[in-house]
Image (cartoon, helix red, strand yellow):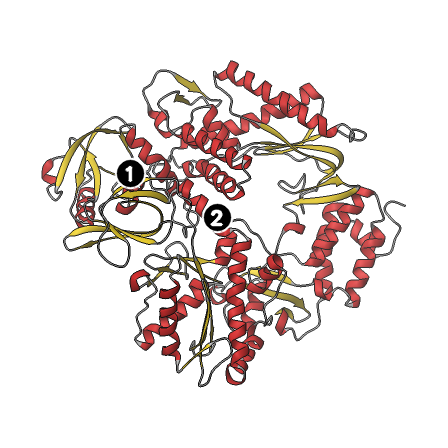
Amino acid sequence: MIEHCFLLTHSGRDTGGRFVITLWAKTADSPIAVVIDNYYPRFFVLHETDRAHTGAARERRALPMKTMDGRPVDCLYFTTLREARDCSAMLRARNIAVFESDIATVDRFLMEHFVRGGFSCEGERMPGTVKRMRNPRIRGADVTPTLTVLSLDIETNAATNEIYSIACTGTTDAVFIIGDAAIDGATACKDEADVLRRFYAHVAADDPDAIIGWNVKDFDLRIIHDRSQALGIPFSLGRDYRTARMAPDTRKNDRWDFIIPGRIVLDVPEMLRATFHTYDEYSLNFVAHAVLGREKLITGEGDDKIAEINRMFAEDKASLAKYNLEDARLTKEILDTAAILPDLIERTKRSGHMLDRLGGSIAAFDNLYLPLLHRAGFVAIDKADVRTDGKGLPGGYVLEPATGIYENVLVFDFKSLYPSIIMSFCIDPLGLISPEKDRINNPTGTSFARSETILPNVVRELMKARQGAKDTGNAPLSQAIKILMNSLYGVLGTTNCRFFSPELSRSITLTGQFILRETASHIEAVYHARVLYGDTDSLFVLLGPGTEAHAEADGHRIAGEINAWLTEMLRERFGADSALELEFESHNRHFLLPAARGGEGGSKKHYCGAVEKDGKLILSFTGMESVRSDWTDLAKDFQQELVLRLFTKRSIEGYILSVVRELRKGALDAKLIYRKRIRKGADEYTKIMPPHVVAAKLLGKPVRVIRYCITVKGPQPVDRRTAPFDYDHYVEKQLRPIAETLLGHEAFDKAVSEQGDLFA
């Protein structure tokens, strides 16, 4: 039989004297478990290595492969993972070179078979009710799965962590709640243990591919795990009733991860951040309102919420069950509306990551590059053997911003600048050390082989795939490929990557600087247009007053002509085939480059443009307070209105004075709330106590996001405020800095002292 599958979870361990891989995947109609027990852990040593040191291997085989500096290698195969690890450690202790000994065996198996989420397996089905195959033939394949999801939410006694109820929504809805009598819309359970057993039975019957929730790892599943252990109940969330386990998340301190055979776990707030859905807060109520236009049944926080849940459990279990289920439903609706799963699936298909793995650019680079490196006949070093020259790596080129307010500014961006540089100049780890004589130089003087390269072709395929995704309107795929492409340079610039090389990183970055400088100079020389600012891959070009009627056409024409010039220039000076593409992004009818706060010159990476649409100005801020989540709504509204008035030359001082008056009268109190994430435990702050930590400590319990205000008695949580607002603080720390940045240091004092209008 042949099955087309999408990988959900994998595991590998020594059992019965051999290494066994288990792949849980989803086929078109059911889950499948694939067992591999004929694949041996392996790594490479130099062919010259004394055989006396490699006797622990079950086999040592000479291969037509070599290190990247040209030395022949042998591959060592081991029966168990422990034997492979022990041998690698022994060789390292004796200063004997090993290669790729740090690659996890399951990851290597998937790489070698080009499995990036999807794969086909051909073989005999094993007996049993659950679909299984043993040692089938596996090959990577393009598979887009339809995954089933179960969203869960729990309600607890906050003092004891005892579980009152568990709600699930998936194929069917269910609520399991402690109660003595029938409860409308829920299953009454005799005690907490009964709740847990019924919950596990429901998960097995619903059989989801993914379990989701709001902070599901650090709260719901952690408490379910702990209460199950306390009550002696197996944590049997896995497929085929297999036991799941909880483990510290190695990528994040004080966080938990869950390994559930056959099921992925997705924490929805975490996935929203990973897929670039940005909100001021990541509470369920805030995001539900932003995404769905709805609110939870209980919108309170802190002690008020705890008291209400305890009251409902004692007096109105039907309402508690309804609230519990509504939270599970809201979480699933947000997941669906934000299209998180399609995005994650497309990322996996391009990077080779597991669905629930976030970030991991270095691992993705290995997944893409290593199999192709092996096909080219080379092996890579261990990460532990990466060497650096100790010098810092250069960043992107930034032109000094020309502060001021301007009319008709064109914004140009280089499309995927660093990936395009990699393609244009054949920048590649293998190409750097290749002895090939036909080489291409780049502006840094480093040369790369033209044909014996891997990375340029990887990037080229990704670029084609992204364009195809754009053409077909597949936004998740386009975004996934963009993220992956843009991570390639960053990976080559970190010593945690086995392919790190200062020459590689500097070749990319310094070439980017060269391209931006040369393009800016060409624009000013040929078009007599001033370049106001440039940053890494963007240029801001001033046309000036009276050019708005033809600005859009000018932008497209200039971009086309620049691309033709770049093609000719790179060919003549470097013999390079340009993959660079300058795109005309927008025409800003008005544009602001503010001064640096408290210093000289312009403020880099801070600007605001106004695009005219249907007779209205639409503001777009970058780097300024209006787009920062840790500034108050008062500051954001104030900045936006000030900028709009500057662009349209309307009254400034009168507006400033009116805002200060309204603030001091208490009319703007609803806009005085700060929101700040707590990055570590409040008790970990000892020397410096930021205002948001002071406020968080007053809550008496850990929180991830604190909503607080500044009162005459200092920072206080919004729902625990006991003192009046400190209006002087908001005038001096929110309004004044914004006004001085936009208008100069004397303008704010002049306005609030009721002197004349700036534009009178």
Q: Nearer the viewer, mark 2 or mark 1?
A: 2
Amino acid carrying label 2: it is: Pro
Residue at the spot of label 2: 342
Observer-nearest of 484 and 682: 484
Residue 386: x and y, percent? 33, 38
Residue at the spot of label 1: 112
Q: Secondary structure at mark 2?
A: helix
Q: Earlier in the sequence, mark 2 or mark 1?
A: 1
| Residue 227 visible in this rendered orientation of the protein | no
Position above or below: 299 against 35: below
Residue 223: x and y, percent? 40, 70
| Residue 698 visible in this rendered orientation of the protein | yes
Amino acid carrying label 1: it is: Glu
User: What is the distance, in whole Å, between disc 2 and disc 1 at their CAs?
Assistant: 25 Å
Observer-nearest of 130 and 648: 130
Looking at the image, residue 376 sits to the left or right of residue 47; the answer is right
Q: Mark 2 and mark 1 in contact? Answer it, CB < 8 Å.
A: no
